[in-house]
Amino acid sequence: MKKRKETPRDTILRSHAMQIQEYRIQPLDNLNIQFQSLTGEDYDFFSKAMPRAAGGTSLSSSALAGIIVDANGHIEYPVVGKIKVSGLTVFQAQDSIKKIASEFLRDVVVRVRLLNFRYTVLGEVNSESTIVSGNTRLTMMEAIGLAGGLTELADRSYVKVVRQSGSESKIFYVDLLKEDYIESPFYYVQQNDVIIVPPLRQRPFKKYFASNLALITATISTILFIVNLSTR
């Protein structure tokens, strides 16, 4: 029997250049936008535009505190009017809004966060679900991990992904077993992705026959025993 080649320890075997893709804001995204400045609250119409609960309680920790990007990719504030944010990364949107807010507020700091980054994982995972994440830079493996990980019967080499792109839905397959998948443009999950993990072809055998093998063996042994007794 051929001896398995040992992997060197404490050394880098290979390195891969990753195609890091920053999420770009889309129409109908829900953004939480916070302003901090030296300007008094009475004159800070940016913060006043944030939704508030009954009784004046701020909902900054809730999705209700978000501003919806309209169908044309704009958000709107009093006095300033509409600001184009679709197509920008979260950090680019921060810079763009800050530049405009600086004309009205002293020493302003702007923080933008996407509230509705979500994806769905179905199939051979331990917890099929739709997950909302505060992290917009999730890898496919991290996304599946948040769904409880893969089952023993999952086909890791043929994972299907349905991805929305404007008014189109694109479908592609990824092989999680290939090391160079790290360099793939599909390495990161995008907003509204649907990840479908199929079962192995051997699933019926493994799930039904293998799990009942002990019962089948015991049944055959019992039958042979009875036949033995009856022929004596």
Image (spheres, rainbow, N blue to C red):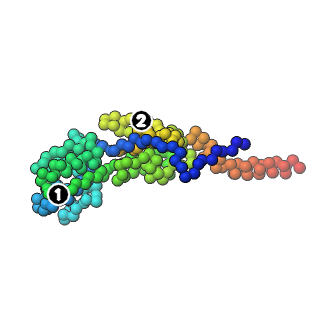
Task: Decide: few, some or many residues near mark 1? Use Cα within 10 Å; few <14, some 14-19, many ≥20.
Answer: few
Asked whether residue 66 appears in the rendered view, the answer is no
- Location of residue 85 in the rendering, given as x and y in whole percent from the top left corner: 23, 44
Residue at 23 percent of width and 42 percent of height: 73
- Sequence order check, earlier mark of 2 and 1: 1
Asked whether residue 167 appears in the rendered view, the answer is yes
Quick check: 195 left or right of 205? Answer: left
- Location of residue 22 in the rendering, given as x and y in whole percent from the top left corner: 34, 44
Nearest to the observer: residue 133 or residue 108: 108
Q: Quadrant of residue 195?
A: top left
Quick check: 208 left or right of 41? Answer: right
Quick check: 86 left or right of 8? Answer: left
Secondary structure of the residue carrying numbered label 2: strand
The residue at the far front in this view is 11
Residue that badge 2 annotates? 171
Give the Cα distance between marks 2 and 1. Answer: 46 Å
Question: Which circle marks residue 107 in the picture?
Answer: 1
Amino acid at pointer 1: Asp
- Location of residue 214 in the rendering, given as x and y in whole percent from the top left corner: 69, 51
